[in-house]
Image (cartoon, rainbow, N blue to C red):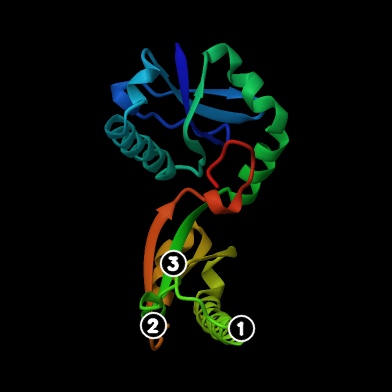
Amino acid sequence: MAVLLYCVTQPSPEIGVATGVSGTAVHSGQMLGVRVYWSELDNPQALADAESLKKAALEFHRVLREILAVTTPIPFRFPTLLESREVLEQHLAPEQELYRDALARVDGAVQYEIVGTWADEQQTDLATPVSGREYLKRRQEALGRVAAVEGKLKTVAADSVREWRGREQSKKHRWFALVPRADRERFIASLRTAGASEGVRLRLSGPWPPSEFVSPRGTRG
């Protein structure tokens, strides 16, 4: 019977989740210093088509949200499937120290994501060639705008964020904030005090599992 992995957490507490992907039971067990959550699938080939995979992904993230409401999980990439329960510990063993260290570092925290988009960037045609000088000019302007927004975010939320990370993407920039559970409301309230920045739209989402702040094999990138 195939095993679908959800996440690892600290050994305690154990979170009871009624159902997982495809209505399966969600199991958990302690091994190698962490607690692992998984479901057993009779027919993993049922996830092969796009529609079934999409539905299963929604169910997968629902399980994570239920666990996140109580403790901090490190999710596996979806879908991470093992051939049987017997190889679960073998799968975790190579990076067991990374899992334990990561869980200790993000313990008691959740992740928020802020996506910044710029109005003029949305209208830029990336397929149109530009000179090297023009490219460098645009690049410097973009870096300056990102730095300005980042500086503002870090200033207003300094007391409620444990760690920041960022990721640049085409026509947008993403910031990730690792926020202690006790400071979630304070974090959101502090962002409201930042005020609007001309030409930029910021969208906040979360809380999420702190996937951007961990890097063991098999976790979400």
Label 3 or label 1, whichever comes before in sequence order: 3
- Which type of secondary structure does the marked residue at label 1 adopt? helix
Q: Is residue 96 above or below residue 179?
A: above
Answer few, some or many: residues within 10 Å of disc 2's Cα (few below 14, many 20 plus, some between 14 and 19).
few
The numbered disc on residue 114 is: 3
Nearest the eye: 186 or 93:
93
Answer few, some or many: residues within 10 Å of disc 1's Cα (few below 14, many 20 plus, some between 14 and 19).
few
The numbered disc on residue 136 is: 1
The residue singled out by tag 2 in the image is 120
Q: Is residue 200 left or right of residue 95?
A: left
- As measured in the structure, the alpha-carbon distance from the residue carrying label 3 to the one carrying label 2 is 19 Å
Nearest the eye: 136 or 199:
136
Q: Is residue 219 left or right of residue 1?
A: right
Q: Is residue 220 above or below residue 41?
A: below
Nearest the eye: 207 or 14:
207
- As measured in the structure, the alpha-carbon distance from the residue carrying label 1 to the one carrying label 2 is 17 Å
Answer few, some or many: residues within 10 Å of disc 3's Cα (few below 14, many 20 plus, some between 14 and 19).
some
